[in-house]
Image (cartoon, rainbow, N blue to C red):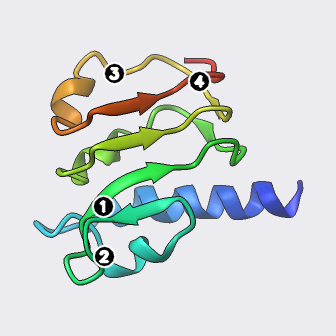
Amino acid sequence: ISIQTLVANCFWFLLVSSFAGANKADTAGFICKFSGVTCWHIDENRVLSIKVTGFGLKGEFPVGIKQCSVLVGLELSRNNFSGVLPTNIGSLVPSLTTLDLSDNQL
């Protein structure tokens, strides 16, 4: 396993796990410091976009993304996500305006 894959998998695990304990502010403040994560404002701790193109991530589409209630951009292209895309993706991330899931096995 490459260091890039290990770091990417740890990042994704922390991202998804942080949603389990997330409060109304969307995420714990540390998540905004991760590579690929952009927040609306550093003091607000609300995720604006996630861009993890080519990070070697794998698994099913992370439904925990719904905790990012003001997310407008999600780019997960060129990873190894598989399975079925949730049919309710519009209600999971209602503010989403950009979604790139290309080059996965969804």
Q: Nearer the viewer, residue 32 or 11?
A: 32
Disc 3 vs disc 1: Cβ atoms closer than 8 Å?
Answer: no
Residue at 42% of width from left, 55% of height from top?
A: 16
N-terminal label among 4 and 2: 2
Mark 4–mark 3 distance (CA, rounded to whole Å): 12 Å
Hey, what amino acid is under mark 4? Ser
- The residue labelled by disc 2 is 28
Q: Secondary structure at mark 1?
A: strand
- The residue labelled by disc 1 is 47
Q: Quadrant of residue 99?
A: top left
Give coordinates of residue 13: x percent, y percent. 53, 59
N-terminal label among 3 and 2: 2
Q: Work out which quarter of the rendered image holds the N terminus and state it.
A: bottom right
- Local crowd at mark 3 within 10 Å, few (<14), some, or many (≥20)? some
Q: Secondary structure at mark 3?
A: loop
- The residue labelled by disc 3 is 86
Mark 3–mark 2 distance (CA, rounded to whole Å): 25 Å
Closer to us: mark 3 or mark 1? 1
